[in-house]
Amino acid sequence: MANTPLDPEVQEWLDFDRQHLWHPYTSASEPLPCYPFKSATGTRIQLHSGESLVDGMSSWWCAIHGYNHPHLNDALKKQAEIASHVMFGGLTHEPAARLGKRLLDVSPPDMQHLFLADSGSVSVEVAIKMAAQYYQATGLKDKGRLLALRNGYHGDTAGAMAVCDPVTGMHSLFTHLLPGHLFAPQPRCRFGDDWDPKDFTPMRRLLEQHHHELCAVIVEPIVQGAGGIWFYHPNYLVELRRACDELDVLLIYDEIATGFGRTGKLFAWEWAGAQPDIMTVGKALTGGYLTLAATLTSKKVAQGISQGGPLMHGPTFMGNPLACAVANASLDLLEQGDWQQQVSWLEQALQEGLEPCAGLDICAETRVCGAIGAVELKSSVDVAAAQAYFVRCGAWIRPFGKLIYLMPPYICSQQDIDTLCEAIFGYLQTS
Ligand code: PMP
């Protein structure tokens, strides 16, 4: 069943939504169309208008096991019977402690302490505070700026936005709010190509010039996500680690998008083997069920901060038991399942499926890394027109800028990938 007339009740809340609710990055007066979501199971999203769509987005990189998973549902139900929430100030609970242990067990060995935040952006705010407080406490009080990468993305709260790409991160709208950080050019040496040491030169130069005022460098390791789905060489991280050690600057890896298997390793830092001082994780942490993130750090940083006093952050929903319980269940699935095989199969399937797009005139290139596939066009995509076409083809894909990308659940079948890739190829042919 597809495109059936909407039930009047559905139409009523849909109209209300259009008139009153903000959706991500849209205008209140002229919003982009929103489709009425009904339910989701496995890799399928059902609309009230009757369409069944193959999910190509994992709900913005989160729903790695697919929707409505019995093991994740059970974990939530069991925890809800015990308590859905309790304050984390002065109280603690088994789901949080167990999750903490399991996260540290799979993280870079230097990571020894963690803070449970309530969203990716907040975990980045906490990472920035950790770096700043570390140097405050250890007596280097001038070290308060950050160095980030162009085309990077780290979240939408003010501190996180200040380290996003200054152009696509819309700094011009908020100049009076944002601290002036520094930016190195995007690494150009690609993942999979021969390493070109010159690629690191601009970053090295900025570090040498500014290390006395820098508390940290922040990067998304290997994959720059929302800033352009760009895959860069692991040696960049090896060089960065070396330079940060030499010049006494902390290194923050934002693994919010790359974590939990998406690039083919459990965390993207593993491609380089160069550990961070601070690391953020989020998104797929709960298998896409609830909002939860974490900021992990080393003993050195935690003890340094503690010389000066407590770490100054404490959100209301910190360590939420429901979110921790479902995150533990998601880690069970990763431990027991064959995500590595699924991601490597997806890499191959996406490469084959997107290949035909590369031959089209409007296409600049296609690129794939792990379970991430992107088609970069020569000009911007008309999001509303593209989505309408994809929905007609039974695919849920949300392009941005010049990019149409896929970030599907790990459980996708060949038929699912065919549906997604054929929808993209079909749209590009008609554009
Ligand atoms: N960092 C990265 C690398 C991200 O991709 C995102 C989300 N797209 C964030 C931070 C922010 O996470 P959240 O949307 O959960 O605040």
Image (tube, rainbow, N blue to C red):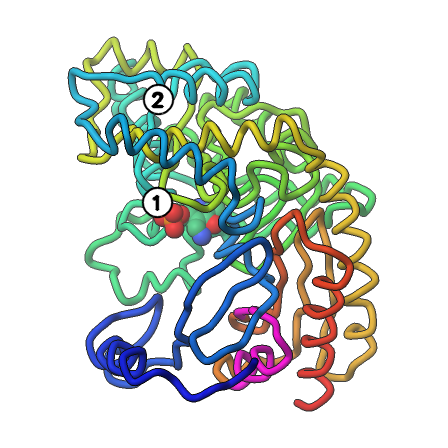
User: Amino acid under label 2?
Assistant: Ala
Q: Is residue 348 left or right of residue 98?
A: right
**Quarter location, residue 309:** top left
Q: Which residue is mark 2?
A: 96
**Quarter location, residue 222:** top right
Nearest the camera: 373 or 332? Answer: 332
Q: Which residue is mark 1?
A: 121
Q: Earlier in the sequence, mark 1 or mark 2?
A: 2
Mark 1: C-beta under 8 Å from nearest atom of ligand 1: yes
Nearest the camera: 17 or 196? Answer: 17
User: Eyeballing the image, is 373 above or below 138?
Assistant: below
Secondary structure state at the residue bearing disc 1: helix
- Residue at 38%, 39% in the rendered image: 146
Label 1 vs label 2: CA separation? Answer: 20 Å
In the image, the segment drawn in magenta is 385-398
User: Eyeballing the image, is 354 above or below 115?
Assistant: below
Which of the numbered marks, if any, corresponds to residue 421? none
Q: Position of residue 242 (x, y in %)?
A: 60, 24
- Residue at 34%, 52% in the rendered image: 161
User: Amino acid under label 1?
Assistant: Ser
- Residue at 51%, 70% in the rendered image: 400
Q: Is residue 288 visible?
A: yes
Q: Is residue 163 visible?
A: no
Secondary structure state at the residue bearing disc 2: helix
Where is the N terminus found, in terms of image quarters? bottom right
Viewer-nearest of discs 1 and 2 = 2
Q: Position of residue 56 (x, y in %)?
A: 60, 62
Q: How many marks?
A: 2
Q: Is residue 60 left or right of residue 378?
A: left
Where is the C terminus found, in terms of image quarters? bottom right
Mark 2: C-beta under 8 Å from nearest atom of ligand 1: no
**Quarter location, residue 424:** bottom right
